Amino acid sequence: MEEPKKNKEQEEPQAEKAAEAENRSTSENELEALRAEYEQLRVQSAEYLDSLQRERASFANYRRRVDQENLQIYDIALGDLIKIFLPVVDDLELALKQKPQITEVDPWYEGIALTLQKLHKTLESKGVQKLDVKPGDEFDPAIHEAVTHEDHPDFSGGQVVEVLQNGYKLNDRIIRPALVRVAK
């Protein structure tokens, strides 16, 4: 009876060792599977991060483009609106030039001058500037519109002889060129 007891005692440590080896093998397999899953998730996470960063950059570019387009639309609309008022400015300036010779201060004349001054300040506050054009300047088709070409003894060919109507620009964009007479 002692022999079966010894076999049993010898078999138990071997069974434990086998179970331990099997557990170790299973643990290593699980660990390897977890490492592979971790690596796969790390790669997927990096791809998602890259995709997110690209989308953010794309959205920022879109936003900047839309803001720029809105600003351009605003400038065009403002320029169109201002063009409507320029003939009024021209008429007021013409009225002031045609002032009859009066020795006393005329309230009508002063009222026209103040109205024109307010209108100029309002236009300037929106970025409108009168083009600086004067006789003797070289003709520039970007800012001048020639009404006539004529021989003139005091000016050489291509020079502005007279400014018939002032030109204006809104910020850096010409909204109305100056009407001029040009020497041949």
Image (spheres, rainbow, N blue to C red):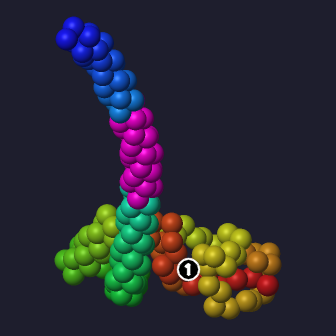
Give x and y (percent) for residue 80.
Answer: 39, 84
Q: Amino acid type of disc 1?
A: Ala
Q: Nearer the viewer, residue 126 or 137?
A: 126
Q: Which residues are magenta?
A: 28-55
Q: Quadrant of residue 145?
A: bottom right
- On whether residue 46 falls in the magenta region, the answer is yes
Give x and y (percent) for residue 171.
Answer: 45, 65
Viewport quadrant of the C terminus: bottom right
Q: Residue, x 36% and y 80% (percent of image)?
A: 77
Give x and y (percent) for residue 8.
Answer: 24, 16
Q: Is residue 70 above or below residue 16?
A: below
Q: Nearer the viewer, residue 21 or 38?
A: 21
Residue at the far front in the pictured view: 1
Q: Which residue is mark 1?
A: 178
Q: How many marks?
A: 1
Element class at badge 1? strand
Q: Residue, x 30% and y 22% (percent of image)?
A: 15
Viewport quadrant of the N terminus: top left
